[in-house]
């Protein structure tokens, strides 16, 4: 159950200006109407029809286009502008697929076709009575990882950053319970709950591929990037395993290919997160369009600081 402390700060103040709430409600209403109208269609069918719009939207929206081009030019300058454009468009398509899948997750998770490998790594840790942190990225559909674990009898929680829109966040908070529990929002209360869960031998998934100002500079796709050490530090503190895991979307086969990788030692958190970055980098190298290139992942490095 969520508490006041679990909510982002914007939700604590109930006297927001009326136009803020009205704007959030309007966005929520549009999303609700879209879901209602498209409810008769299957997720894969809807994605096939609408996904190309996501690719063109990346080129049409300057902020997305510029950010993706900057990131791609920084890590793969030798590939050229045409290749960068193609990857950015594919990432836009994958992002739209994710937007279609996520609000339908309750039903979609029941029909989702999965091909899983490496579950023995997670099962071995559980057999030892230890908890585990599943380190993943904004790649494919990360909820496929938790669904694969749940089908194997392993309940996996998640800690996530709350949506800025309170109405969308409340809906998302309820929806993603279908992939496993507990569902925790980032913040002091969420962190305390996650530590307790890990110490009890629980499993939780953390997305670790975003920049956080002031974090140590570690290599990511061959470039220095601010990388938070929290996942490795928590694993060490709670005697939990740090296991990279990924859910790749296979559009042609209409399935998700989930991989649980070998545990990473956490004696040295910086070294552990360097290895996590390397594993994520390998996923991206194998299928770059699956990763969301729209984060400011190398912002500090570009400024030369």
Image (cartoon, rainbow, N blue to C red):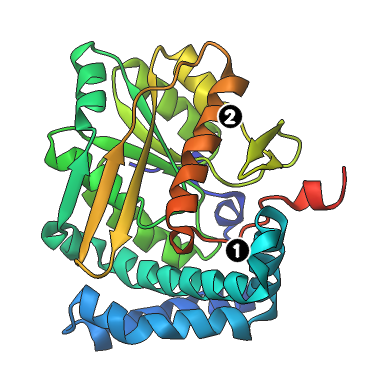
Q: Where is residue 203 in the image (x, y as percent from the top left)?
A: 31, 29
Q: In this view, does 80 lie to the left or right of 31?
A: right
Comparing 258 with 96, the one in front is 258
Residue furthest to the front in view is 78
Task: Estimate the spatial distance between the alpha carbons at disc 2 and disc 1, rounded to whole Å.
Answer: 21 Å
The picture places residue 302, in percent across and down from the top left corner, at 81, 52
Q: Kindly state the secondary structure of the residue where label 1 is placed.
A: loop
Look at 60% across and 63% down and name the residue there: 294
Q: Is residue 173 above or below residue 191?
A: below
Q: In which quarter of the image is residue 45?
A: bottom left
Q: In which quarter of the image is residue 101?
A: bottom left
Local SS, label 2 = helix
Sequence-wise, the earlier of marks 2 and 1 is: 2
Give the residue number, with chain letter if any, for mark 1. Answer: 294
Find residue 243 and name its label: none
Kindly give the residue lying farthest to the right in the view shown.
Answer: 304
Residue 166 left/right relative to 295: left
Q: Residue at x 37, y 41 (%)?
A: 158
Q: Is residue 301 left or right of residue 130?
A: right
Say which quadrant the C terminus sits in. Answer: top right
- Which residue bears the numbered disc 2? 274
Identified at 60% across, 56% down, the residue is 10
* Nearest to viewer (mark 2 / mark 1): 2
253 or 59, nearer to the observer? 253
Residue 249 left/right relative to 55: left
| Residue 183: % across, % down | 35, 42
């Amino acid at each position: 159950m969520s508490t006041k402390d679990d909510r982002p700060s914007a939700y604590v103040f109930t006297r927001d200006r009326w136009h803020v709430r009205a704007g959030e409600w309007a966005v929520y209403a549009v999303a609700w109407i879209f879901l209602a109208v498209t409810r008769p269609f299957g997720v894969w069918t809807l994605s096939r029809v609408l996904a190309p719009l996501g690719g063109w939207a990346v080129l049409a929206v300057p902020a997305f286009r510029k950010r993706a081009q900057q990131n791609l030019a920084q890590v793969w300058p030798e590939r050229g502008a045409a290749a960068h454009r193609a990857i950015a468009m594919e990432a836009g398509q994958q992002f739209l697929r994710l937007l279609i899948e996520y609000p339908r997750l309750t039903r979609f998770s029941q029909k989702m076709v999965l091909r899983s490998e490496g579950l023995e790594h997670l099962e071995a840790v559980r057999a030892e009575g230890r908890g585990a942190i599943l380190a993943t990225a904004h790649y494919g559909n990360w909820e496929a990882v938790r669904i694969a674990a749940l089908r194997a009898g392993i309940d996996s929680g998640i800690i996530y950053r709350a949506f800025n829109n309170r109405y969308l966040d409340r809906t998302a908070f309820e929806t993603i319970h279908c992939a496993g529990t507990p569902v925790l929002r980032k913040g002091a209360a969420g962190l305390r709950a996650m530590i307790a869960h890990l110490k009890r031998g629980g499993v939780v998934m953390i997305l670790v591929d975003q920049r956080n100002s002031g974090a140590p500079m570690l290599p990511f796709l061959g470039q220095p990037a601010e990388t938070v050490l929290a996942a490795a530090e928590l694993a060490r503190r709670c005697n939990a395993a740090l296991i990279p895991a990924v859910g790749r979307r296979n559009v042609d086969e209409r399935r998700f290919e989930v991989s649980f990788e070998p545990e990473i030692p956490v004696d040295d958190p910086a070294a552990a997160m360097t290895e996590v970055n390397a594993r994520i980098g390998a996923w991206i190298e194998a299928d770059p369009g699956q990763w969301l290139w729209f984060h400011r992942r190398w912002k500090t490095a570009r400024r030369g600081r």
